[in-house]
């Protein structure tokens, strides 16, 4: 609770200099940022994804990457509640000031198992971070068709892409179908849930079945432009 409280305080404080979020009213921060981040984590836990084969495949360690983390959602609340000795979280965002906010918040909250890195996902995924995570999350970053290409290349075979989405995902799912397969992802599973404030949400879960072929992710213009 102390860690989550510090995340909220730092968000409101740093928002004055960094302009991080439009949501600053305390109840809304808790509901739309904290609870909205933690409910999907509960779904992953219920499915055994946080404790099962992903950990055993990696010497007991669960490695999670959050793409387009912004002010640190869902990665900061995840880190706040996940065990520090067996979880490693990396928050990635293309905007340096947001990455700085995440680092400052982690330090203020005493969360040592989250790191943050500035960069574009489609570029970072070509380097040392490729296929080295059990889970890649993303909330409010892009349409699924684009999002799968920004996340899947970071995930090791057997791991998961977990996209935090609003309630209507059918159209996005259809649009992402072909490219998801190309990237090595299996059939998506959609878990719908409702926030305490009444808003509907969907967690879209893809399991990574095979390696992402060389050449992916493509340059952002190509990802965005393609209808594949
Ligand atoms: N996940 C956060 C922020 C959402 S806003 C939340 O839910 O509150 C989307 C964020 O994605 C922005 O901070 C933007 O800088 C980042 N972003 C967009 N495209 C990106 C890319 N290709 N690589 C890395 N970050 C990206």
Image (cartoon, rainbow, N blue to C red):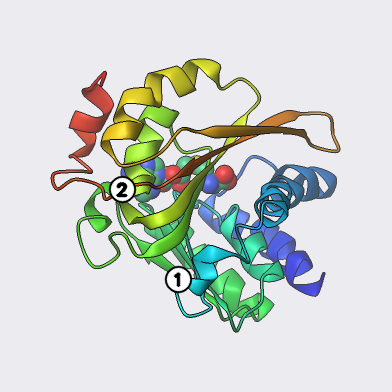
Residue, disc 2:
210
**Front residue of this view, candidates 7 and 191:** 191
Quadrant of the snapshot with the N terminus: bottom right
Please indicate whether residue 196 sits to the left or right of residue 12 in the image: right
Q: What residue is rendered at 79% in x and 37% in y? A: 195
Mark 2 crowdedness (10 Å alpha carbons): few <14, some 14-19, many ≥20: some
Please indicate whether residue 75 sits to the left or right of residue 46 in the image: left
Vertical arrangement, residue 65 with respect to residue 122, above or below: below
Q: Which x, y percent locates residue 127?
A: 20, 63
**Front residue of this view, candidates 138 and 27:** 138
Which secondary structure, mark 1? loop
Say which label, 2 or 1, has the lower sequence index.
1
Q: Which x, y percent locates residue 45?
A: 69, 57
- Confirm or reject: label 2 Cβ below 8 Å from ligand 1: no
Q: What residue is rendered at 45% in x and 71% in y? A: 57
Q: Which x, y percent locates residue 143?
A: 43, 28
Which secondary structure, mark 2? loop
Where residue 223 sits, quadrant-wise, is top left
**Can you name the residue that lies furthest to the bottom here?**
85
Spatial CA distance of label 2 from label 1 is 15 Å
Mark 1 crowdedness (10 Å alpha carbons): few <14, some 14-19, many ≥20: some
In this figure, what is the number of numbered marks? Answer: 2
Residue, disc 1:
57
**Front residue of this view, candidates 64 and 181:** 181
Where residue 185 sits, quadrant-wise, is top left
Please indicate whether residue 223 sits to the left or right of residue 148 in the image: left
Q: What residue is rendered at 64% in x and 62% in y? A: 78
């Amino acid at each position: 609770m102390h860690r989550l409280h510090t995340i909220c305080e730092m968000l409101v404080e740093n928002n004055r200099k960094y302009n991080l979020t439009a949501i600053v009213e305390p109840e809304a921060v808790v509901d739309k940022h904290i609870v909205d981040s933690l409910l999907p984590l509960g779904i992953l836990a219920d499915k055994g994804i946080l404790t099962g084969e992903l950990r055993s495949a990696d010497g007991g360690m669960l490695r999670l990457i959050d793409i387009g983390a912004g002010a640190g959602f869902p990665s900061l609340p995840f880190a706040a509640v996940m065990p520090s000795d067996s979880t490693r979280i990396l928050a990635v965002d293309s905007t340096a000031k947001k990455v700085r906010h995440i680092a400052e918040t982690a330090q203020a909250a005493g969360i040592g198992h989250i790191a943050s890195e500035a960069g574009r996902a489609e570029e970072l995924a070509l380097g040392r971070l490729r296929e080295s995570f059990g889970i890649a999350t993303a909330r409010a970053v892009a349409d699924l068709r684009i999002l799968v290409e920004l996340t899947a290349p970071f995930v090791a075979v057997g791991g998961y892409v977990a996209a935090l989405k609003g309630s209507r995902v059918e159209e996005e799912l259809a649009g992402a179908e072909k490219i998801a397969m190309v990237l090595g992802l299996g059939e998506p599973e959609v878990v719908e849930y409702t926030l305490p404030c009444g808003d509907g949400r969907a967690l879209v879960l893809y399991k990574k079945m095979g390696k992402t072929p060389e050449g992916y992710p493509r340059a952002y213009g190509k990802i965005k432009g393609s209808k594949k």
